[in-house]
Amino acid sequence: MWISDPIYPVFRTRHLQRLIEKGLDEAVQFDEDCPTRLAEAIRYSLLAPGKRIRPYFVLLACALCGGDPSNAVPAACAVEMIHTYSLVHDDLPAIDNDDLRRGRSTCHKQFDEPTAILVGDALIPLAFETLGKLSSPALTGICSVELARAAGASALVGGQMDDVANEKNHNSNSDSASIELLERIHLRKTGALIRVSLRLGAIIAGASNRRVAALDDYGKNFGLAFQITDDLIDVQGNTNTAGKQVKKDAELNKWTYPSLLGIEKSEAEAKRYVNEAINALSIFENDYPEKEILTKAAQNLIGRSK
């Protein structure tokens, strides 16, 4: 389990975990018109054991802003659906060509490439259908726009496009220009869904603009630190612990913080972003356990192995 029990009350952690897993499972109970193989592949990908960072962040942000996290479950599931679709498509031979994801075969290896493409295609509309289960049409509309923007051409997909495009051109710019572009890629490819997770939870709780902005700032810095440490795992980690293939970035000629800055400077950058993320939470009262777990979540990025 990604959230550490000693930091977050055990009953609360298990409650949130149950809410997420139950919501995801219920969302993929398809009717007879969904082909059996497609349904199996969707469930295989979406219900695979993972950290569930993004859906947890939706529920944590909602609770931190005084809301009932059970009201935010549809949004938590929707974000995880978009995240899963992006992983399934990223793993395809045309992009990263990965064989392992979350400790087991990637979707296209377990099934086949056409099925994997269709799994992603199905998860996108399912995410917005799931948002329709929020408490009001108005809230569904607001959250749908937030998620669509985060998943779109100027955010998640745009970051993926730049990431792919620069695999073959990573020596074409100066180091400073490369770092600037790399940060822009990470802010979109990784950061966009983390940020929107926190924003959605806060919006559902009826939080003030100031609180939404603070959580967005936390997510921005958390996302950058998360990606840097992910890059470090690819260089220093092992496949069994990480649950995915390592040493892939160099093979794909990808820009990463370690490739541009080296290990030591990359670790320093990760720590800087972690501190910025924690500072963003300063507007929240200290008696909220959700503030403590978000703080610990950022701190735990340093030295993580998966």
Image (spheres, rainbow, N blue to C red):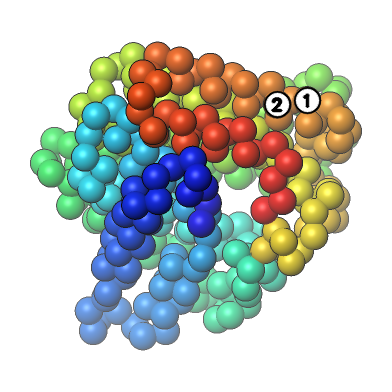
Do residues under tags 1 and 2 come within 8 Å of each other at their CB atoms? Answer: yes
Locate residue 153 relative to residue 136 in the image: left or right: right
Q: Secondary structure at mark 2?
A: helix
- Residue to which mark 2 is pinned: 271
> Does residue 229 lie above or below 205 as drawn?
below
Tell me the crowding category of disc 1: few under 14, some 14 to 19, or many 20 or more residues within 10 angstroms, Cα based: some
Residue 49 x, y percent position in the rendering: 51, 65
Residue 239 x, y percent position in the rendering: 76, 63
Residue 225 x, y percent position in the rendering: 65, 33
Of 61 and 3, which appears nearest the observer? 3
Locate residue 134 relative to residue 305 in the image: left or right: left
Amino acid type at mark 1: Ala
Q: Is residue 164 visible?
A: yes
Amino acid type at mark 2: Lys
- Residue to which mark 1 is pinned: 268
Q: Is residue 79 visible?
A: no
> Does residue 103 lie above or below 252 as drawn?
below
Name the residue: 52% across, 75% down: 114
The quadrant holding residue 141 is: top left
> Does residue 70 lie above or below 111 as drawn?
above
